[in-house]
Amino acid sequence: MSEEIKLMKGNEAIAHAAIRCGCDGYFGYPITPQSEVLETLMEVEPWKTTGMNVLQAESEIAAINMVYGGAGTGKKVMTSSSSPGVSLKQEGVSYLAGAELPALIVNVMRGGPGLGTIQPSQADYFQTVKGGGHGDYRLIALAPASVQEMADFVGLAFDLAFKYRNPAIILADGVIGQMMEKVVLPPFKPRRTDEEIEKECPWAAVGKKKNRERNVITSLELDPAMMEERNNNLQRKYKTIEENEVRYEEFMCEDAEYLFVAFGSSARICQKAVELAREQGIKVGLLRPITLWPFPTKIIAKYADQVKAMLSVELNAGQMVEDIRLAVNGKVKVEHFGRLGGIVYTPNEIIEAMKAKIM
């Protein structure tokens, strides 16, 4: 059977992929530039076909707490928003991590701080990769660079979230959310039955049954020693994720003397910049982190022994650059180049920044 190729926005691909991967529930609130996720779900009406629940909550805070409730029963649940909305969700995200509940959060980033702009940005790296909410927790963070990856990462995020009982986030930017590309949607996967959920998620709160103790979902522990042990268990889990789930992509890095490090739409622009720079005789490569956490620290450290310098290219004032500098541990020069306010750089601007900053 031939693949069905469709033309759609990144946000639309998120919605269709959620339906197809057996998502049980979506709870969200509209905000530019991610509103098409909710709008597409309301248009397609999956509750009539797969039984997926779709609800526009009264606020972002309500939406993330609905996700908490659904995740606590072992259901595949998700929410989406953009930067200011994700800020409002942070307490609930911390609660999800503390209670070790699997869930999917989608953030299609816009510029800030505050209300900022509806134009694209990558300035939520700190908010996502460094935690955002309170406490020592981590989110599995996937950064798509195409509409196809917007679709593909929905299923992957759910798989990782349930594998590790940890919330996962798709950290996209406004460019990827709004751009239109060809995409092959994933095959339909039926929603799990209650019996399957109870078997796969023995921790879930599904009600007290005969010969079975009732599960209690909470992140609260009043005994300091027990709370420390709970936190130590989380840190051990995060270490396992760091060892097993790092994902990245290399482009023309074999003989590179200089290295761009970029994610999302910035990586797409950097790929063209690499090609143009090569035409000028400059040996530059591109490393694209696919997982922003766990971060590809080891591979970046390896390139520190090969290249003369690195340029972190981000649509922000310099956030991922801190993790790159930690990875190289002073072995090579690492600089940042970015644009703010929703202005997207061109490949030639990146090349000029490279010449000015690291050559």
Image (cartoon, rainbow, N blue to C red):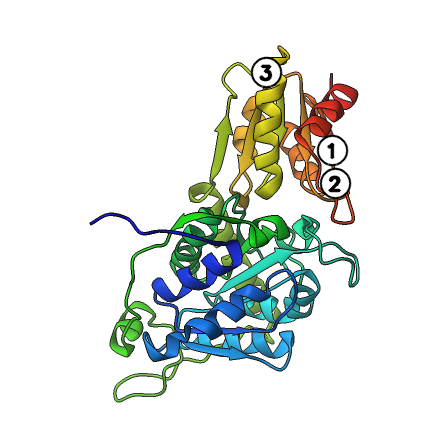
Q: Is residue 48 above or below residue 153?
A: below
- Residue 6 in the image, given as x and y percentages of width and height: 39, 52
- Residue 51 in the image, given as x and y percentages of width and height: 34, 78
Q: Residue at position x 59%, y 40% from top?
A: 263
What's the amino acid at mark 1? His
**Could you say whether the residue bearing mark 1 is in a helix, strand or loop?**
strand
Say which quarter of the image contains residue 337: top right
Q: Nearer the viewer, mark 1 or mark 3?
A: 3
Distance from disc 1 to disc 3, alpha carbons, whole Å, reads 21 Å
What's the amino acid at mark 2? Gly
| Number of numbered labels in the structure image | 3
Q: Which mark sits nearer the N-terminus, 1 or 2?
A: 2
* Residue that carries the numbered disc 3 in the rendered image: 278
Disc 1, disc 2: CB below 8 Å?
yes
Say which quarter of the image contains residue 105: bottom right
Q: Which mark sits nearer the N-terminus, 1 or 3?
A: 3
Distance from disc 1 to disc 2, alpha carbons, whole Å, reads 6 Å
What's the amino acid at mark 3? Arg
Q: Which mark sits nearer the N-terminus, 3 or 2?
A: 3
Say the numbered circle drawn on residue 336.
Answer: 1
Q: Residue at position x 61%, y 49% from top?
A: 175
Distance from disc 3 to disc 2, alpha carbons, whole Å, reads 26 Å
* Residue that carries the numbered disc 2 in the rendered image: 318
**Any part of residue 131 in sight:** yes
- Residue 74 in the image, given as x and y percentages of width and height: 39, 73
For the residue carrying disc 1, how many other residues have a C-alpha within 10 Å: few (<14), some (14-19), or many (20+)? many
- Residue 39 in the image, given as x and y percentages of width and height: 53, 70
